[in-house]
Image (cartoon, rainbow, N blue to C red):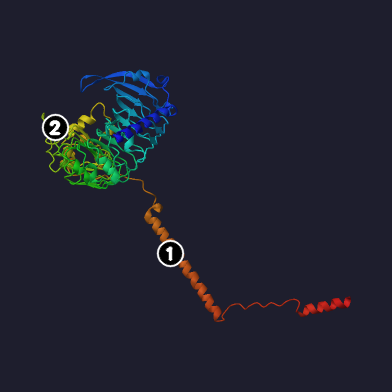
Amino acid sequence: MEKLLVTFLLFFVSGLWNVQGREGEFEPIEKICDRCKCSLHKEFTSSEQDKFLSYSVLDCSTKNLRHMLAEWPEEFAQDLKPGQELVFSLSGNDIHSLQQLPATEADLVFSCRHCNLSELASGLFLDTPNIVRLDLSWNRLSGDVLTPDVFRGPYNDEVYEPLALDELDLSNNLISYLDGSLFEHMAHLRSLSLSKNPLEKITPDTTLALGSIRRLEHLDLSYTGIDELPRGVFDKIDGLKELYLQGNHFKAVPSAIALLKPTLKILNIGDNPIQMLNDESFFDLDRLTHLNISMMENLEDIIIGTFSGLKSLEVLVCSNNPSLMTFDMSDLKGLVRLRQLDLSNCGLQHLHLDEPIPIIDHNSDIAQFEVFQKLRSVNLEGNPWHCDCDLYKTIESFKHILEDEFHGPATSPSNEARCESPYDLAALPLTDLGPLSLCNSPPKKVPKIPIYEAPAFLRPRSIMLSLLSVGIVLLIGFVIGFAIVCIKRRLQKADFGFTSPVRYTTVRDSTTSNILQQQQQQHV
């Protein structure tokens, strides 16, 4: 009884403090609908339920606000009831510190993107337990700010009731780790985005936090700088369906993904420094329907058997892999549900098929296609295709799809896949390849095109001969000069010189000088 009394007093004091501080920390609501966009009961038709649904909008984005609203506008306060959806936005305002939201029992969709948020109030959603979607992306939130107390719901007896939160977007912040118990009040969370945060390493606390979201279905860890994924991340998650790991530092597909085999449907592992994919890469993910392995600059080999276990695969995107030169279509023959294949903008020159279909007689009224029966979209553009008989036979397996796509009214001819080699077939669309020129005749040699020939004195051979001649002349001159110097020195040493040394005498010491001096003295 004493514990309950103490708890009650604490909450009373806390509530009193919040009431006293609301005047200076909250935006007034007088004429708020003149500044913001207020819309009540916007209706739309749900195709799934085939009935009219309604929601209300309070859009205060980019209105130079600095704080949370003190309360809801009067028009909304009278109408915010359980089951009614309210869309509330403060995005684009310079708020920094986000205070507690006004109380409502409506299903709340709240957005505060690009608000320079660095602080979140304790009990931020205490009076909005039915918040279903929360977007706090593009702010300056860190792991220290994201505490369990921020997301606690109303207090009931001895526990806090969980929020109704279904989607949480924390992308583009400064989060390097997560508190281990961060999601303890988010039992209903199904979608979480941590994209473009500097996680770099999945710490034990982060592993504990992510592994505690049992109902999680969508997890985005793209562009977070991680290079490994601990198995504990998925230990307690029952139904993860979508996983996004693109833009990280994985050198191989993480083995922890094997734990998601019963439920995973969408996987994006693109834009990672992976060099090779093999039959162990996707661990027989037989429920996977969409796979993206694009934008891998180092990807060189896709070993046969890589996709053989993906029995439910419908969409395979393998584009923008410049080091990938060959692709084996044989690996896709067992994928009976495959309907979309994207191999655009790679370095592909060859498509292999271990048992290509026979050459089809196009004069026949009945076209028989033995493989890829459900394939409806194939993108092969942007590759340096080498057109030969093998490529022709492989293309024939889905040529009807290429013709529908490239010859349709909305397709530009410049986007059509074309041959790059051999020379005589360069720029020819793949759909125009024929068996007569490729399979029934020997390959043609590339013709030698006459090119400009330089004058004789500028040809490499002439230049080399000229340089050699100059070198020989210089060498001979050097040898002769050196020989002359040596002979002259030897003659001088043997005293056989042709000239005698010159001897000099000063004028003052000569006889003539003395006589002239005596005569000058006598005259004086």
Residue 418: % across, % down: 25, 37
Q: Is residue 26 above or below residue 304?
A: above
Task: Indicate the quadrant where residue 58 lies.
Answer: top left
Q: Is residue 62 above or below residue 296?
A: above
Can residue 277 be seen from the camera position used here? yes
Q: Is residue 228 left or right of residue 359?
A: right
Amino acid bearing label 1: Ile
- Kindly identify which numbered label has been placed on residue 362: 2
Q: Secondary structure at mark 1?
A: helix
Q: Secondary structure at mark 2?
A: loop
Question: Which quadrant is the N terminus positioned in?
Answer: top left
Amino acid bearing label 2: His
Q: Is residue 350 above or below residue 368?
A: below
Q: Nearer the viewer, residue 35 or 160?
A: 160
Question: Which quadrant is the C terminus positioned in?
Answer: bottom right
Q: Nearer the viewer, residue 505 or 380?
A: 380
Residue furthest to the bottom: 494
Tell me which residue sits at (65%, 77%) in the image: 502
Q: Which residue is mark 1?
A: 472
Task: Indicate the quadrant where residue 295 lies.
Answer: top left
Can residue 297 be seen from the camera position used here? no
Label tally? 2
Which tag, 2 or 1, sits closer to the chain's start?
Answer: 2
Q: Nearer the viewer, residue 515 or 245?
A: 245
- Kindly identify which numbered label has been placed on residue 283: none
Tell me which residue sits at (54%, 78%) in the image: 491
In this view, the mark in front (2 or 1): 2
Residue 11: % across, % down: 34, 32
Residue 109: % across, % down: 31, 27
